[in-house]
Image (spheres, rainbow, N blue to C red):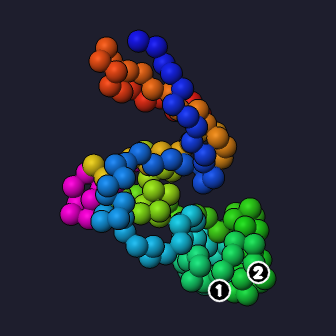
Amino acid sequence: MKWEKAGVVGVDSGQIVICDPCYIDGQWAPKTEPPGHDPLHITKKGRARFPKANAVYRYPKDFPNFADPIPSLGGLSANDAVGRHLLEQVPQEPSGEFSYRGCCMASRSEKPQLYYRSGFSGAGVALSSGYGDGTYPVYIKRNKTGRIKEVLIKF
């Protein structure tokens, strides 16, 4: 059997989740904090310059935007401080939570598995789209009786 084009999938967050849609209403965790950036802390290079050595700056609690000035960093933005190696992002283990934040964490890690609220695996898998945002073709392959047996997304 050959591949046939099923359609396209749009990606605006650089990631994709594969799941059974029947679990979205009952298993999807409510949004508890915005997704995206991990906590930041001052590195050794920054200790002499800033009084809060080893302080943790959390987005959005301590700064509303990565481009906005942070007073305790002398008015530097988080982006500027990271670029100057005064702050570094602290890697976090993916939570596996079946939520947008959980998907964001999983898609940036080597552990893309998402879990049901009960803790069992199988809620889904979140992956990076590999090439970022865009529209990607989805192909299917059928068995001899016409059932879909494979899915391919070309990033």
Q: How many marks?
A: 2
First in sequence, mark 1 or 2: give its number: 1
Mark 2: give few (<14), some (14-19) or many (20+) Cα within 10 Å.
some
Magenta-colored segment: predominant secondary structure: loop
Q: Quarter of the image containing the C terminus?
A: top right
Q: Position of residue 53 (x, y in %)?
A: 59, 80
- Estimate the x, y position of residue 26 in percent, counting from the top left: 30, 65
Farthest residue to the front: give it.
Answer: 145
Residue 43: x percent and y percent? Answer: 61, 68
Magenta residues, start to end: 112-121
Residue nearest the viewer, comparing 10 with 90 = 10
Q: Which mark is residue 69?
A: 2
Instruction: Residue 67: name its quadrant.
Output: bottom right
Q: Left or right? Give the position of 142 relative to 41.
A: left
Q: Amino acid at mark 2?
A: Pro
Residue shown at the point (53%, 45%) measured from the top left: 128
Residue at (58% x, 32% y) in the render = 137
